[in-house]
Amino acid sequence: MKAAWILAKSRWRERPGTLLLLSLAMAMSAAVPFGTDRAVRREVVQLRQQTQSIPLVAGSSDAGQTDLVLSALDYDPRNIPPTRWALVEAARQDAPEGVLPMHLGHRTSGLTLVGTESEVASTLGLTLTSGRWCVRPGEVVAGADTPTDAFSVGQVVDSEAPKKFALQAPPTQKLLVVGRCASTGSPADQVVWTNLTTAWVLDGLFHAHLNEDVKQSTEQRQVLSPNTPLARRLYEQDTSTLHAHTLESDLPIHLLRIVPKDQRSLTLVRSNLRHAHGATTAVPEFVADELAESFAARAKLIQLAVLIPGIGVSLLALLVIGLDWQRRRSEHAGLRRLGASQSMLVGSFALELLGTVLVGLMLLASMAFLLSLFAAQWVM
Amino acid sequence: MSSEPVILLQDVVVHRGTFCLKIPNLQINSGERVGIVAPSGQGKSTLLLLLAGLIAPSQGLVQVHGVSPSCQPAAWRARNIAWMGSDLELPTDLRVQEQVALAAYLMNQAAPSSDEVESTLQKLGIGGFAHRTMSSLSTGQQQRVALARMLLHPAPLRLADEPTASMDEGWASACTNLLLSRPEDLTVCFASHDPTLIDQADRVITPEGSVR
């Protein structure tokens, strides 16, 4: 046994490359399917849980159903063109329990800034741990997972325009943190909420001028009084000319999260938005099923893409072992002449393989763990 | 010397391919140092393989320590015969220390101590090489490692096939002394072309067993 052990040990010690190559091939072949399957299962479960809280979403006629649903889930606008305020009013005509407009085009300190209304609290079940909800333009409420050093109540943060360096981009705006939310365990914890009218400001439609050339309010135009404490705080240099240039109906909205009263209400709202307003609507629960299938298909592709190199590496490792076989045979013949039994030689080979399997298992465990972390990104 | 011969061969015929070796009678007693001398291809290695039980005779009687060696299990060979082949055939991944202790491991005995190993290696001019792998040594050095392994093997019969073939004259002489050194009950049988080694044998025979 001891002879078998020192022989096996000498192989691992002197030929770690072969050992590692074999182990890696083994681990890859096993860990990738395992890791991706695990990640897909986890993502699908999470997706279904999240979609249960969103009965219906609606958006521009040019938006895809999947993009609408995923944008509603993770607050990333993806490929959905903005729609108009009229769609919100149309949805509210059928009197559902809640219609939550969302503008998703801006960021602040690297976080998504979601422009919406105070109805967000009841529709998404958000509660405050400190401060209050934003009620005026320029105010924001931070999600539970946002950094407290940058988003504590009373701090002023800068908005980041979507096209920061474009010549016609709106200027950076100051935003005042007025509250922080309690944790919900959803992506809502990682965003910053603001009053929808601020999205208007951020798009440069409602902003301050540095001169006295102030236009008056008209029926189609709102003007925010420059003498409010908020305006003075945000725009210390010149607070005299804060005014609007656009209609409320032009407020940019990316999507609507709608909570109908019942199934009949859902059908009614959906039908109205689709036929009367040409909007795209989607029931996230159904889309989640389609996405689950799509994730599984992508996972299969990834598995195939990794398995082929995995098999290649395995063949390479086998070739290395095959080329080594002649030397091994000669050594075994020498050992038999010294008195080594066949069982001892088989034992040393088995121990060598056992070591490879053990290293492979360790690699497999760590790779499966890492893959389950990253595979979700690949399959989404 | 004991009266019972360590090696006894009678009317032995060995076929290896087209080669045929006939040994009418050969007897080697305990404590004898016997050299086997012949031109290449005349059966020196075949005779040693036969004595080690690594090949079986086609006919005739072969006895080593009173038994037929080719019918014995590997463990018997490990206990009774210290073998050094002409092809070293050593596992190249083993370190020198592991290599010389291998025989003890195969016999399920305690390995020689580091001091014993180092002392033997010193005598063979490879002191300080204990932790080097075989593949890092020259052929001559590898042969001395194989000799060290044989010297540390406590078996009562040493069989060596051209043990000094790759050594220079100085080391061949030193290794000869170590290989043939007493204790009295140790029997050594070697095949060689090296006159230094052959000169120190008690008896020199041909592969057929006749005295030269």
Image (spheres, rainbow, N blue to C red):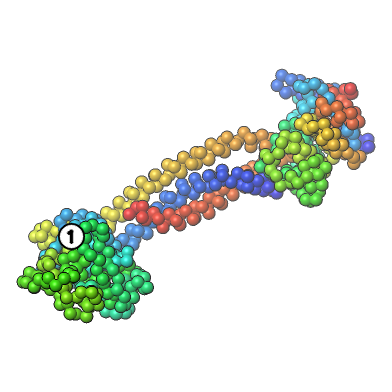
Quarter of the rendering occupied by the C terminus of chain B: top right
Q: Nearer the viewer, residue A230 or A25?
A: A230
Q: Nearer the viewer, residue B180 or B132?
A: B132
Locate residue A125, reporting x and y percent: 27, 73
Disc 1 element = loop
Residue B126 visible somewhere in the drawing? yes
| Quarter-of-image position of residue B191 | top right
| Quarter-of-image position of residue B18 | top right
Reading the image, the residue beneath label 1 is A82
Image-based side of A32 in relation to A234, left or right: right
Locate residue B109, reporting x and y percent: 77, 49
Image-based side of B59 in relation to A299, left or right: right
Residue appearing at x 21%, y 72% in the figure? A195
Residue appearing at x 78%, y 50% in the figure? B114
Q: Nearer the viewer, residue B28 or B171?
A: B171
Locate residue A16, reporting x and y percent: 58, 46
Residue appearing at x 33%, y 58% in the figure? A44
Relative to A202, say whether B159 is above or below: above
Query: Can you name the residue that lies furthest to the front here?
Result: A211
Quarter of the rendering occupied by the N terminus of chain B: top right
Q: Residues within 10 Å of mark 1 (few under 14, many from 20)?
A: many
Locate residue A353, reporting x and y percent: 58, 46
Image-based side of A7 in relation to A85, left or right: right
- Identify residue type, mark 1: Pro
Q: Nearer the viewer, residue A119 or A311?
A: A119
Residue appearing at x 46%, y 41% in the figure? A311
User: How many callouts does the rendering have?
Assistant: 1
Label 1 is found on which chain of the structure?
A
